[in-house]
Amino acid sequence: MLPACYVVNYLLFRVFFDYGFMQGAPVYVASLDPHGMFNAWSALVFYLAALGPMFLLLHFDLWPLTKFPAVMQQPVLGIVWTIIALALGGLAFYVGIGILGMDPVAFMVRVPVPFIFGTIVVLNMVQGSLFAELTQPVKGVVSFIAAVVIGTALAQMYLALMPLVTGELKAGPPAYDQEIWLASALLSVTFPFLIFHAEYFKLWPLAKDSPRS
C-alpha cells in the first residue's frame, strides 16, 4: 500500500500540478515544475476538498453505502467512495471558489483543512465515543457538526497565537504567509500532539478503560 500511495501521488503531481505562476521567483526551478494541467494552488485545494467527503463518510460509518452489500466489497467500495469524494469535493470547490468567490488558499485553510483536523479529533482522538449512543444518520450529522466546530476552533486558536509565536503575518497573495503558517501549524502541532496523547497516555482520561494512575 505504501508504494502504491507514492505512485498515485506522483502521478497526480505530474499530471495536475503546474507551478508556472511562480516563474521569476528565486525558489522557482523550471526543471522541477511538472507543468501539469492546473495551477498548483487550485490542484492542491481541490485535492484537499475531495479529502473532506472521504472523512465525511467515516462520520456516517459509510452509511448509506452499508445498505448495499454489493457496494461494501472491494474494489467496488473504493471506486464508489472515490467517486462520491470527487463529486462532493468538486461541489464544495465550485461553491466556495466559483460562486462565493473565495481565494482558493483561503478556502483551503477555512473549510477542508479545519474539517479534516476536527474529524481526526472526533474520530481518532476520542475514538468516536462522543456520540456512540446515537444511530445513523443522526450520529453522522452530529459528529460532522462537532468536527466542523472543533476544527474551526482549533484553527482560530492557532491564528490567535500566531502573533505571539512568529509575529503578524500577511494573508492573501502572492505569498499567503498567514495561510501557509496556519496549515503548517495544524499539521506540525496537532498531529504530534495526537500521537503523543494516543501512545504515551493511551488516550487517558478520554478512553473509558484507561488507567487512572
Image (cartoon, rainbow, N blue to C red):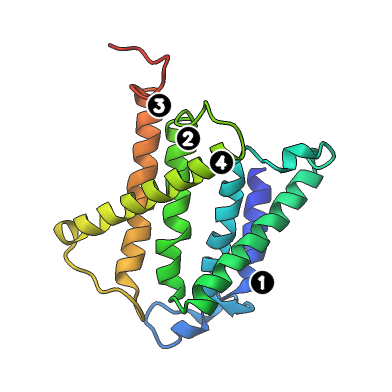
Q: Amino acid at mark 4?
A: Gly
Disc with the residue nearer the chain's start (1 vs 4): 1
Which of the labelled discs sits on residue 199, or is there none?
A: 3
Q: Nearer the viewer, mark 3 or mark 4?
A: 4
Q: What kind of element bears circle 4?
A: helix
Q: Secondary structure at mark 3?
A: helix
Seen at 54% across and 44% down, the residue is 141
Give how far across and how far down residue 88 sits, in percent.
63, 61
User: Disc 3 or 1, which lies upstream in sequence?
Assistant: 1
Question: Which of the two labelled residues, at mark 2 and mark 4, occupies the earlier sequence position?
Answer: 2
The amino acid type, in three-letter code, at marker 2 is: Asn
Tell me what residue is drawn at x 66 percent, y 72 percent. 15
Q: Upstream in the sequence, badge 2 or badge 3?
A: 2
Cβ atoms under marks 3 and 4 closer than 8 Å: no
Residue that numbered label 4 is attached to: 140
Distance in Å between CA atoms under marks 2 and 4: 15 Å
Q: Is residue 41 visible?
A: no
* Above or below, 190 relative to 171: above
| Mark sitting earlier along the chain (2/1) | 1
